[in-house]
Image (tube, helix red, strand yellow):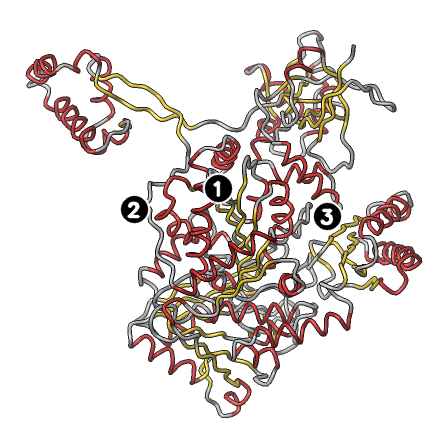
Amino acid sequence: MSYFINVILPIPLDKEFTYSINKTEAAFLKPGMRVAVQFGKSKVYAALVTKIHETPPLVYEAKEIEHILDEFAIVTPQQLKIWAWISEYYMCTKGEVMRAALPGAFLLESETIVFKNEQTSFDESLLKDDEFLIFEALQYQSVLRVQEIMNIIGKKNVLPVIKRLLEKEVITVQEEIYEQYKPKIVRFVRLHKEYNKEASLRDLLDSMTRSPKQREVLLHLFTLQAQANKPIKVSELIKTSNSSSSVVKTLINKGILEEYHLQRDRVEYETGKNGESKELNEYQHKAFLEIENSFKEKDVCLFHGVTSSGKTEVYVKLIEKVIQEGKQVLYLLPEIALTTQLITRLQEYFGEKLTVYHSKYSVNERVEAWNNVKAGKSKAQVIIGARSAIFLPFVNLGLIVVDEEHENTFKQYDPAPRYHARDTAIVLAKMFGAKVVLGSATPALETYYNANQGKYGFVQLTRRFGNVLMPEINLVDVKTKYKKKEMTGHFSDTLLISIREVLAEGEQVILFQNRRGYSPVVECNTCGHSPQCPNCDVSLTFHSYRNQLRCHYCGYHMAMPQKCIVCESVDLTTKGFGTEQIENELQELFPDHAIGRMDQDTTRGKHGYEKIINRFEEGDIDIMVGTQMLSKGLDFRNVSLVGIMNADNLLNFPDFRAHERSFQLMQQVAGRAGRTKKRGKVLIQTYNPYHQILQQVSVNDYLGMYKDQIEERHQYKYPPFYKIIKITGKHKDYNKVNDAMDWLGVSFRNVFKLNVLGPEFPPISRIRNQYHKNIIIKIPQKQSLQKTKEVIKKINTSFKSIKEFSGVRIIINVDNY
């Protein structure tokens, strides 16, 4: 009898593939294990088993697998279920979901290894220079890897050279698959068993009078053992005894100490300090009970609490309850910056039960977190992470907290799968019968609408913790200030006076400008030319700290020109301003105060966020300038003034969510002010102080904003009343994209009639040398989403078979907002 397995390959193909296995392999394999399989002519991949069966494939003959890679399943049945849902709902392939879900170390791909062909003899003079270099290298070592060949011949593309050598039968090649994850092994030492008795130990110490250094090391070992009842690392002993590794080695060789090795996790958290969570005040306690009550009837609850109302403390109480039941909790955050602050807070309550998972962690650290969650270890009971943590192999999930649920960073835009972590979390929780809390001070319109419709539970917390008043928000009319000459650089006199007052009191200031760099446009005053990115339709942004012009879309950069590239005039000016320029102006205005900047340029590296946030918390920075990173739920106790440098560039954006997003962003930034005793102050600089959104922000009128926006959405057929699927065509040839998208537009219009918008070029129509053109399909509530997607897939398949449009890449983005 023949046995077969279905596998998912980590490549963007829609279907699963079937491979043949023998009887013993069939008995051993389980869904969720990885096997090495050959796909295509010679490439070997680590594929994931989904099903073991006895039905051979109809169209092709099943190849045999190479070998089994795992002893246990690394992916759970629930994960395979959620992958299938993501692939179906967000219209992407299971291979793409697999690539996003698994840590890089699990996604093994083969590496080509080159051997010298011992079977044939040939004339060396027929070899070209680069071929001879490889041949010569093989005389000295038995195998070469692709990377080594690149270094030898100094070229990136070495495949043509390898191909020529294969044709001349000089070499043979083989594909090898190798494990990337290496566990961390730590060296420990302990006193040899012989010296456990007091008498033998006394004799030992007496005999060591002539070796003072060795005696010193031993005494330090006893001290460390007395201090903490845990294994003693070799490195720790060397450090505390101020000795060297050679002294420790001598003691090991003499048989006085013995060394042993243990496997350790790369990220470990200390035990909590007090382990007791704070007592909730009456409003928090009432909210906690209301959430508990809403969970009796509904699985999802929207927790609408104003900024600084102490939502985290309520979450902590909910988490404590779930942990006592022995279940796991997932705490999702929109920004990695937030995890650093939250870890410190949650560590006090949950200590070692905490695991963190996000993209700034190394591959090995992520594999360890993955294994701990799957094993249901006590150190992985509370998992904090950004959106990718949704893919972890939970075994008994009890609660998901989605903090700042309105944030658009929960949506993955590129590459596929283009999923939304909040919506996926709700589906994941349903699979486990778990509960979901969506927390925000400014909920997304769709979430608030669902709560109003009774689909979700709804709990409000309208008072700030400690009864601190909401910040006083004032609008500053920059237009009038410029006319009256009351501006210094980009600062109005009102803002400067307030900053001086706050600094005099010894408090801190946050200034928000949602643009990094020094200035977004450099312009020649003589001919008006402004340097553009050669690959994208955007002007280059000037970064003064590197004296460079950079493109924020493709990363292209060049040195800042001394004169105009076109007319060679030296009269160049900058237009607009970013965080760097604000920082420079502040340094001139407040030379005696420490200025910090928090944007993508200053938070690179694993601990980039941590360093800046800690410096600000400890009071080393007086004024912090930053982009939207600053707005997301960070808790600074000493900030009493927040300044928004320019509110208009948020509002005037061609997107149906622009006004909602502006409101959320400004409210969130404002919420960083006055979080302890004193009432905070917020100043918003704008050219249009009578704009409705700004008026609503100034009086914290979320409900007014919601009513206005929901009315508009209903009128113009946007979510939550209509679902949206965005289809983008990409190609480097402008005409090809145009023709292709026009064809698609006509095809969709034939089916969906008036519910098709476009095809239209977006505001930035060329990125990385590729032209983009969009079509938006609106789906009314009564129309079947499933059937709509089937039609889109059919039309897309027909499109792919048209020869003239080959090379035009089509991207389907479901719920693209």
Q: Residue 698: x, y in percent?
A: 52, 79
Q: Residue at x 55, y 81 (%)?
A: 686
Viewer-side label of 2, 3: 2
Q: Residues within 10 Å of mark 1 (few under 14, many from 20)?
A: some
Residue identified by numbered label 1: 361
Residue identified by numbered label 2: 273
Report the disc number at residue 727: none
Q: Residue at x 76, y 59 (%)?
A: 724
Disc 1 to disc 2, how far (Cα)? 25 Å
| Farthest bottom residue in view | 484
The secondary structure type at the circle numbered 2 is: loop
Q: Residues within 10 Å of mark 2 (few under 14, many from 20)?
A: few
User: N-terminal of the two: label 2 or label 3?
Assistant: 3
Quarter of the figure with residue 10 = top right
Residue 587 visible at all: no
Q: Residue at x 47, y 63 (%)?
A: 630
Residue 8 visible at all: yes
The secondary structure type at the circle numbered 3 is: loop
User: N-terminal of the two: label 1 or label 3?
Assistant: 3
Give 484 or 810, whichever is nearer the viewer.
Answer: 810
**Disc 2 to disc 3: CB gap under 8 Å:** no
